[in-house]
Each structure stands twice: as structure tokens, then as C-alpha cells.
Amino acid sequence: MKIAIIGTGNVGGALATAWSKAGHTIFLGVQDTTDFKGKELLKNAKTSVHTVQNAVREAELILLATPAPAAVEIALSLGDTSGKVIVDAMNIVMGRGPAGFTNTADAILANTNTRDVVKSFNTTGFNNMKNPVYGNMAIDMFMAGDSERGKKIVRQLALDAGFAECYDVGGNDKFQLMEQFAFFWINLAMMRGQGREIGFKLLKR
């Protein structure tokens, strides 16, 4: 799959590397193609750097992994997103987010021309995207959105990144729940002293 990654920091970089290893083609979308965070990602296979709009133009799917306050600005910078899936990996934390929105995915929907927006890869730390395996098992990923087409693709991308499963928690009305789940992980890891090396696994019997 051709994937544009907007936001080449910790989360975007971890997923760019994982998806490159899985055989996907990665287009890094940046403001300045000569000076950007994550230059080392160009060492990955099938990875190239472009302006944001050119990366989006080439891609079938777009991952947004930028700071939440910039969600509207980033969405507006994408250009024509018709027919493309957008994956929102951002979170509003401690009230820091796009003005007028309770979650970043709604901000993306309001400022792009695609309806295929899926919130995922936001509920755990970038370290778990680099390595989702704990002992002899991999942790799980989660996703939400009305787009069944988008969620089918996102589930496969989660498996390609090494997660055991990607569970569907509902439609667009669960965007905020996904961000609350992310803050739950942040709270345990950072505020309650558990550290970043923790992850969630859905067990069944």
C-alpha cells in the first residue's frame, strides 16, 4: 500500500519503519524537504520525502501523527483527500487540542473532503509501535470510525506492524472514547509511575 505519513516524530517514525519493513511504500509529508525531523527514516526501504500535498497525492492512505493543537491546520494543508483513508493517531491531552473540537478526528472530518477517517494508533506509546511484543505475545491495537473500508485497511496495517489484533470499538461517536483510552495509558505510564513499557491485551475465555 502507498502510505503518506504526516508527522515524522516518534509515532509517525515508528509506524513508517514498521510498515516499510512490511513492504509498504512510504511517502513522508513534511513542510521542508531539506530539513525535517526523522531524516533517518529515508534509510528505510521504499521511503521517500515530499511536500505534504505531494505525499498525499501519491498515497492511498494518510497517517496523521502531529501535535493535536495543529489538527485543523494540518487537515487543511493536505489538499484533495477524495477517496483516501485518513488514520488519526493524535490525542487531545490536558485540554491541548484544536479549538472548538473535543477530539482530533472530528476536526479532520470537518476540514477534509473524505469521510473515511479512522482513529487508531493513538492508544499506546510509540515504544509499543516499535515493538508490540511482550514475552511470547503481542499486545493489541484498537480503532474507531464509521468507515468500514477504512477499518478493514487499518486492521491489516496493525497486524503488519506486529500487533496481535486491532479491535473495532465503534463508529465516529467513539472518537472521544479512544482519546480517553489513550489518556488512561498516559496516566498509568507517566503519572502513576508504571513506565512506558506497558500495553493492553484483550483476553477472552
Image: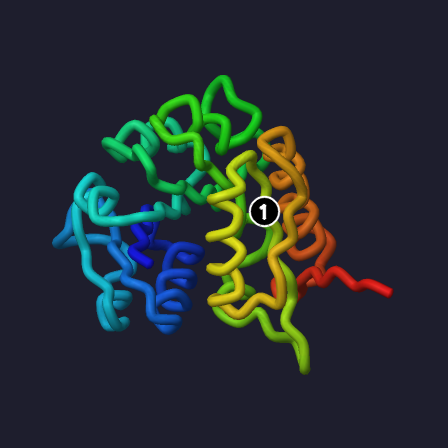
Q: How dense is the environment of label 1, judged by Cα within 10 Å: few (below 14), some, or many (20 and up)?
A: many
Q: Is residue 99 above or below residue 131?
A: above
Tell me residue 21's x, y (percent).
37, 73
Q: Which colouring convention does the figure follow?
A: rainbow
The tally of labels here is: 1
Q: Left or right? Give the position of 159 relative to 20.
A: right
Tell me residue 125's x, y (percent).
55, 57
Quadrant housing residue 169: top right
Q: Residue drawn 28% across and 62% down?
A: 25
Location of the N terminus by quadrant is: bottom left
Q: Residue drawn 62% across and 33% down?
A: 176
Tell me residue 70's x, y (percent).
38, 32
Amino acid type at circle 1 is: Met
Q: Which residue is mark 1?
A: 143
Q: Left or right? Give the position of 194 relative to 71.
A: right
Q: Is residue 82 above or below residue 11?
A: above
Q: Residue drawn 23% across and 32% down?
A: 79
Q: Residue drawn 21% across and 48% down?
A: 58
Location of the C terminus by quadrant is: bottom right
Identify which residue, 189 or 6, lies in the foreground: 6
Furthest toward the bottom, the residue is: 136
Identify which residue, 50 or 3, lies in the foreground: 3
Identify which residue, 56 or 146, lies in the foreground: 146
Q: Is residue 147 above or below residue 24?
A: above
Quadrant housing residue 24: bottom left
